[in-house]
Image: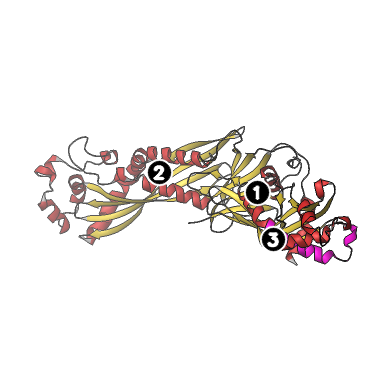
Amino acid sequence: MLLFWGSLLCWGLLPQAQGQARHLLFLRVSKDQLETDISDLFSEQRILDHVTRIPVTEAAGEGVPILDHLPFVREGLSRKSSRLDLSLVGDLLSGKSLPLLEELFQAGGLIIEDAKGPEVTLQILSDSLFQVTLQTKLYLSLQRILRFSIIKNIRIGVRLEQTGNKTRVALDDCHTPPGNLSIEVLEQMNPFLVNEALKVITGVLDKTLPFFLQKMVCPLATTLLNSLLEDVLRITLAPTISGPEDFQYHVTTTELTEEAILMQVQLVTRCGPGQRAPRPDHLAPQPLPKLAQGSMADLAFWLEAYNDILSCLYTSKELLVDLQDSTAAALIQLLSPRELEPGPETSGQSRGSVGLTVSTPDPPTVCLDGHTAMALQPGSLVLRGPSNTSSVSVSWKLLSKAMFSSKNQELELQFTPNSTVALGPHPAGLAGQEERLEALVLELLKRTFLPHHNELLREQGLPLPSIKGISFDQARMEPSEDYMLLTVPEE
């Protein structure tokens, strides 16, 4: 029943006239995948290494700008080699002299021991603006008195600027908002000192951390982010695709949606004489369905655009049927005009003078039956008489569930053996034998034609675009209403 209704949907989608081979596609990269790519890149490049293991010394130039605001070491409060006066520490820890806390800060030194992250989050602000937040966790110690961690955010604004058919990435200010320090005490020698120490630390770091992170992290972070986004917006073909008839993908417009970066892509393909023309401009595509859950990206083909691409890729080859095939022999006997039917004495000679061919000049067509993709191939079976003086033709339409594969950076369509056939006009002399004719034609197509045709379609696959960080080799086709979605699942 599914194949029957699918056939009714497909009959009206057969090829029309030739035209320009420019096809509208949509490429989406999920917001979650973009977050992952940014996070992985920052981790690989170790952008927080510059802020770790910061020494605090009295020698000028050995510190880092964040600490320039703190008079950590004073000559009068420390011994040689920058060691603390232990009597000062002892008096402080005993609570004997609380005002010495400030002097301990000046003498002891505050060190950023380690940094974790960044954890990346991406917030869409408009159709052309989003914000990347890098959450960093810094681990600091005040000599042996206190160890604590601080969570601080770095924010980078990103704007997509459209100029004609080109999208440019523009990075806004990279900064660390002041205030909102999240401090967690990890180790302490004397709980009595913690609150007083944190008051001083908070006041100092709240003023100096934004400046420090902006200076130490932002330059590298913005350079890497700009490079990554430029790569995402630049799609190319795999290096193996070359020659004067190259396929070309062009990103024409880019916008941000709630779930993804959406790029409108123009695919330019070769199209020979007699191949189908693209649909008129006024037939605008329907709204895109949501990005499939658990997918990092997809390439969305409007159904009509996909069929146009199929027609431009398709080159037919006539198949000459082996006359020794038992089904072919039965078809020849059924289709032969009476004057061509061999007698007992001339059967070998007559059989050798006829030919049976399968002709498929028109390309296949894909149609959608709910969320199932069906493939329709029209063709004809032609019996030619001696010296091509006469012929008998039976037209047919083969309907199958469409199977797709995306190996070696190409999208291929395949027919399944579980197919049905519908016959078109056939000789009037076959009245009452239609069922037998249909059964023989279907058997011949499934056993002889389909392997040949699937091999032909594999040679005429659609080259897929190459995008940094995204491979369509393991993509799966997910039909949706009005669209074919080539979806790349999360790894």
Which residue is pictured at 82% across the width and 53% down the height?
A: 393
Amino acid bearing label 2: Thr
Q: Residue 431 lies in magenta, yes or no?
A: yes
Residue designated by label 2: 176
Mark 3, mark 1: which one is toward the viewer? 3
Secondary structure at badge 1 equals strand
374 w.r.t. 276: above or below: below
Q: Are marks 2 and 3 in contact (CB under 8 Å)?
A: no
Secondary structure at badge 2 equals loop
- The crowding category of the residue bearing disc 3, from other C-alpha atoms within 10 Å (few below 14, some 14 to 19, many at least 20), is some
Residue span colored magenta: 427-448
Q: Is residue 195 left or right of residue 448?
A: left
Residue designated by label 1: 301
- The crowding category of the residue bearing disc 1, from other C-alpha atoms within 10 Å (few below 14, some 14 to 19, many at least 20), is many
In percent of width and height, residue 374 lies at 70, 58
In percent of width and height, residue 429 lies at 90, 60
Marks 3/1: CA–CA distance:
29 Å
Amino acid bearing label 1: Phe
Instruction: Tell me the tag on residue 133.
Output: none
Which residue is pictured at 62% across the width and 42% down the height?
A: 264
Q: Residue 113 lies in magenta, yes or no?
A: no
In the rendered image, is residue 245 in sight? yes
Of mark 2 and mark 3, the one earlier in the sequence is 2
In percent of width and height, residue 338 lies at 88, 58
Secondary structure at badge 3 equals helix
Marks 2/3: CA–CA distance:
66 Å
Marks 1/2: CA–CA distance:
42 Å
Of mark 1 and mark 2, the one earlier in the sequence is 2
Residue designated by label 3: 446
Of mark 3 and mark 1, the one earlier in the sequence is 1
By secondary structure, the bulk of the magenta-drawn segment is best described as helix
Looking at this view, is 464 or 224 the one in front?
A: 464
